[in-house]
Image (cartoon, helix red, strand yellow):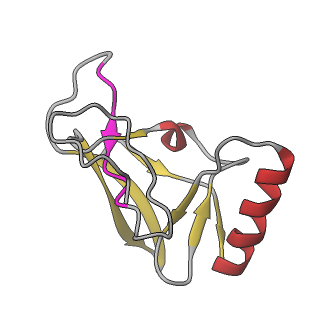
């Protein structure tokens, strides 16, 4: 285990409103991580360092939803040994969206998009 992805647990309707508000406020990135169909973790303003972990098509870590005392949590686990000063990455696995989101990971096997 590397780190838990923490933030505020919210529903989809709230996440949609916040995403629009963050765009209006000029916040360049929002850190919304879907746990399941009903729950999203918003780490934009109250998250930890896990929100800064980048995507890679060839990641050294993966995200997993675990249940602890009836609460779903997002935990980042390593796939392999991670060296000091090595960037920690995982595959965001974004669902299919209207527009393709370009991937800039530069991995040999890069898919070209995050979705």
**What residue appears at the point 58 percent right and 63 percent down from the top-left corner?**
41
**Does the magenta-highlighted stretch encompass residue 89?**
yes
Q: Where residue 39 sits in the image (x, y, percent)?
A: 56, 77
Left or right: 31 with respect to 82? right
The outermost residue toward the front is 99
Along the line of sight, which residue is nearer the eye, 114 or 13? 114
Residue 23 to residue 82: above or below: below
Query: Which residue of the protein is positioned furthest toward the top in this rendering?
Result: 85
Q: How many marks?
A: 0
Residue farthest toward the bottom in the current orientation of the protein: 38
From the image, which quarter does the C terminus lie in?
bottom left
Q: Which residues are magenta?
A: 86-93
21 relative to 83 in the view: left or right: right
Q: Position of residue 53 (x, y in %)?
A: 44, 38
- Vertical relation: 89 (above or below) 75: above
Residue at point 23%, 42% (across, down) = 110
Above or below, 31 against 106 in this view is: below
Residue positioned most to the right: 25
Of residues 1 and 69, the one nearer the viewer is 1
Percent x, y for residue 35? 47, 71
Residue 72 image offset from top left, x and y in percent: 46, 73
In this rendered view, identify the residue nearer to me: 27 or 102: 102
């Amino acid at each position: 285990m590397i780190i838990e992805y923490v933030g505020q647990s919210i529903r989809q309707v709230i996440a949609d409103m916040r995403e629009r508000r963050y765009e209006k406020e000029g916040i360049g990135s929002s850190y919304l991580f879907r746990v399941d169909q009903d729950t999203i973790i918003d780490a934009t303003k109250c998250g930890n360092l896990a929100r800064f972990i980048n995507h890679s098509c060839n990641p050294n870590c993966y995200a997993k939803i675990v249940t602890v005392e009836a609460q779903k949590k997002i935990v980042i686990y390593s796939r392999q040994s991670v060296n000091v000063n090595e960037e920690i990455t995982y595959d965001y696995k974004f669902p299919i969206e209207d527009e393709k989101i370009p991937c800039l990971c530069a991995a040999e096997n890069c898919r070209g998009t995050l979705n």
